Amino acid sequence: MTASSATESGLIFDTGLGQFDREVIENSHAHPVVVDFWADWCPPCRALTPVLERVVAQYGGRIRLAKVEVDADDNMKLAGRYGLRGFPTVLLFVKGEIAGRFVSAHPDQWVRDFIDTHAGLD
């Protein structure tokens, strides 16, 4: 599966404050959800986005990627809710709880190892 087909199939999606609990917390009971908190002005954010999209697509539907633009609408409140201090920050939700987090851009294999370690996939 490619990143573009993952986006088209709803495995990769944008979310925000109003939809976060339903689209991320509730859905993480069915599938792990990686959440990318990013900002347009942030070069490491722009570097990490394609990495996350590629890696999530490699899981073939077993994991989701939610993208939160922190400068849009009231989304900075979500960053505050989770105590985020820098961007990009990635949170991994499994069964409604944060199973792991990391900050800054990393290569594909590092991100895949992070997901494998924290997502509890069989």
Image (tube, grey):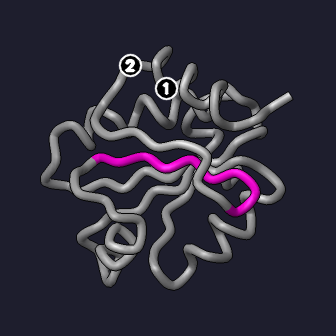
How many numbered tags mark residues here?
Answer: 2
- Identify which residue, 5 or 106, lies in the foreground: 106
Please state the horizontal and vertical placement of residue 90, each as a whole percent of the image.
43, 46
Q: Which label was assigned to residue 75?
A: none
Foreground residue among 38 and 101: 101
Mark identifier at residue 111: 1
Q: Which of 79 and 66 is in front in this view?
A: 79
- Residue found 54% across the figure and 56% down from its top: 66
Q: Position of residue 32 (x, y in %)?
A: 70, 47
Q: In the figure, is residue 23 to the left or right of 73?
A: right
Q: What whole-number distance in Å separates the C-alpha atoms at marks 2 and 1?
A: 6 Å
Cβ–Cβ below 8 Å for labels 2 and 1? yes
Residue at 46% x, 74% y is 16
Q: Is residue 31 left or right of residue 40?
A: right
According to the picture, the residue beneath numbered tag 2 turns out to be 107
Quadrant location of residue 55?
Answer: top right
Badge 2 amino acid: Pro
The quarter of the rendered structure image containing the N terminus is top right
Q: Is mark 2 on a helix, strand or loop?
A: loop
Look at the magenta stretch and give its main secondary structure: strand
Bin the neighbour count of mark 2 within 10 Å (Cα to Cα): few under 14, some 14-19, many 20 and up. Answer: few
Residue drawn at point x = 37 percent, y = 56 percent: 37
Q: Can residue 2 be seen in this view?
A: yes
Which residues make up the magenta segment?
A: 88-96
Instruction: Check disc 1 and report its element: helix, strand or loop.
Output: helix
Q: Is residue 8 visible?
A: no
